[in-house]
Amino acid sequence: MQRKILIGLALTWLCTALFAAATPRMQAQAMDSRPAPRTAIATFAGGCFWCMEGPFDALPGVLSTTSGYTGGKTPSPTYEEVSAGGTGHAESVRVVYDPTVVSYEKLLEVFWHNVDPLTANRQFCDGGTQYRSAIFFHTPEQAAAATASRDALAASGRFERPIVTQIVAASEFFPAEAYHQDFYLRNPVRYKFYRYNCGRDRRLEEVWGKTGNSEGVGHE
């Protein structure tokens, strides 16, 4: 009897050990079987790129945002070169998103409500072509959607002045220096100080009314 008990205990221990060893593999296999998110890229310029990451990061379906430079002629430009003007680049943000979760039209909506589309070569306190507002389309479908959204705004009667935001084909995108990435998260005090003193939220409220929150992160 005692021998049978010992054999039973041994078998129980062995089954438990085998299950414990198999569980991580089963979990990994289950995770591997999940469909990977589809990805697409959108690129926008709306003045200081510090201020453009947060509104998109707040959207479900946005996988990442990267501050950088695009639309210019100088290869691998530095922040100093771009901010001085002359390279042709605009400070911009590249958005990687899952189009099955968030549509490009929603990204456009968030973009418009975080820029001043009525002022050329300037956004808020920052002047120069490097601070122009622009939509850099990656596909014909994005070009059509961007144009349609601009035309709908122009026809809405909201503005007495023309919309001057550029809609142009995307060119090579150069990520900005590491210290610019997620600046609004890593340096919140400095970010809020800059944003307030630049008059960004004040001007956005003049253009769009109270359509978001005071930090410009997201849009209702």
Image (cartoon, helix red, strand yellow):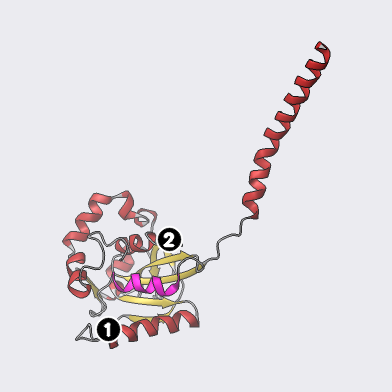
Label 1: few (<14), some (14–19) or many (≥20) C-alpha neighbours in 10 Å: some
Query: Residue 214: horizontal and vertical position, in percent?
Result: 22, 60
Dot 2 amino acid type: Pro
Q: Secondary structure at mark 1?
A: loop
Q: Is residue 14 above or below residue 158?
A: above
| Numbered range of the magenta stretch | 103-114
Q: State the image quarter where residue 127 is shown.
A: bottom left
Residue that mark 2 sits on: 60
Residue that mark 1 sits on: 163
Query: Residue 57: horizontal and vertical position, in percent?
Result: 38, 59
Q: Nearer the viewer, mark 1 or mark 2?
A: 2
Q: Residue at x 75, y 27 (%)?
A: 14
Q: Is residue 71 above or below residue 48?
A: below
Instruction: Give the residue at the far top of this rendering.
Output: 2
Dot 1 amino acid type: Ile
Q: Can residue 76 be seen at all in this image of the molecule?
A: no
Q: Is residue 61 found left or right of 183 in the rendered image? A: right
Q: Is residue 139 above or below residue 59?
A: below
Label 2: few (<14), some (14–19) or many (≥20) C-alpha neighbours in 10 Å: few
Q: Residue at x 31, y 65 (%)?
A: 219
Identify the image quadrant of the N terminus: top right
Which tag, 1 or 2, sits closer to the chain's start? 2
Q: Is residue 192 above or below residue 106?
A: above
